[in-house]
Amino acid sequence: MPDATFSRRDILWAAGALSVSAAFAEPLAAAQLAVAGPEPTSWVDPTMPEITHRMIETNGIRLHVAEQGEGPLIILCHGFPECWYSWRHQLGALAKAGFRAVAPDLRGYGRSDRPEDVEKYTILHNIGDLVGLVDALDARQAVIAGHDIGAAIAWQTALLRPDRFRAVVALSPPFRSRAFGDSGPPTTLMPRTKDAVFYQLYFQTPEAEAALGGDLRRTFRSMFYSLSGDSPPPAGAGGFAAGMVPRNGDFLTNPVSLPSWVSEADIDIYVEEFTRSGFRGPLNWWRNIDHSWELMAAFSQAVVTVPALYIAGEHDMIVELFQPIIAKQSAMVPKLRPAVMLPGCGHWTQQERAPQVSTAMIDFLRTL
């Protein structure tokens, strides 16, 4: 089917006042958002004409993908709360280097389908989506890369299906057995005090959905700043010190200015995408942490057999939390290459240090 060209205004037109109001109200249910009408199946945004957008059927749902380049396939999985756009810099760099780069919106995000049932957001659902995506792209194999929860998914996808994913690149989270560790149900091990809870516990609550979705621009300005290498030391990092969030939910700051690596125009994109999707689907990942851990029981202590690259920012909160695991992960990933640790970089790895991340990925891919 030939590509059609749509501006963002064209694409959002059918949503009308419903989409606009969503940015200023509490998140709407997926069923309410769905009344906007059908999406186009293929389009090009004139602001980024080199990237092709498509809707692809996989694993019983439709995923939106952004695609650029020709050559060996690499799939790029975003983190929370992001979307395909977090890989905007790598799409072009990988395409120029001779690779076919495909960045999907994970289920629940952006233009991808948003199943109603909370139980439809386990790690096995995400892995199934990606296996089906490789099939839908008419490829035999792919390299998989991921950031944040996308890295957790990428690690486990490479573990379970080395026949379809020949290598893995992980940004921020290290490899962990069963995706969340072997010690016990993850939520039972997460810290909590009288005044604060671990962020993954907070993200499972209705209060998190309301707080994150209430003022989208403030949410993204706050999170990109507070978890970046540009933020103050942890005590001033908006309540995220050591991964803890105040029980009153007051953790969103509104910085006077943004770091140099993200612009107000970039924030516009994230606001647009989450106006469309809301936070319910994205937060359902966290609501399934224990269930996902249970589903991965058969793969406890299984070893990742494909070549792997780990990239992280030295100021990333995740690196602070999982330093002991990072130091030992090569025991579970025997083909792990030397880690790329980025000085001064925080959590938003591929956005904060786009040239360095792209170069490291391309150098790794060329050795496969």
Image (spheres, rainbow, N blue to C red):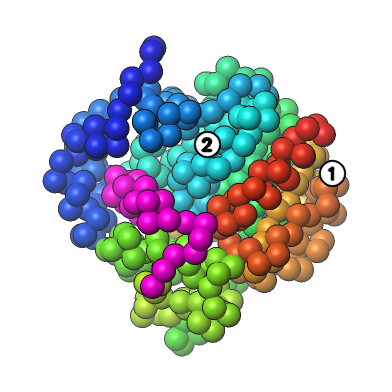
Please tell me which of labels 1 and 2 falls first in the chain. 2
Q: In the image as oriented, which residue stretches furthest toward the left?
A: 17
Amino acid identity at mark 2: Ala
| Percent coordinates x, y for residue 179 in the rendering | 64, 53
Identify the residue under disc 2.
103
Q: Quadrant of the C terminus?
A: top right
Which quadrant of the figure has residue 61? Answer: top left
Task: State the residue in front, 366 or 247.
Answer: 366
Q: Is residue 350 magenta?
A: no
In the picture, the disc for residue 112 is none
- Amino acid at pointer 1: Lys
Q: Is residue 28 above or below residue 95?
A: below
Q: 10 Å neighbourhood of mark 2: few (<14), some, or many (≥20)?
A: many
Residue shown at 19% from the left, 35% from the top: 13
Residue marked by disc 1: 335
Query: Which mark lies nearer to you, 1 or 2?
Result: 2
Q: Nearer the viewer, residue 364 or 328?
A: 364
Residue 291 visible, this angle: no
Where does the magenta region start and end? Answer: 256-282
Image quarter (top left, top right, bottom left or bottom right) of the N terminus: top left
Residue at the spot 32% in from the left edge and 60% down from the top edge: 217
Mark pair 1, 2: CA separation: 25 Å
Magenta stretch, main secondary structure, is helix
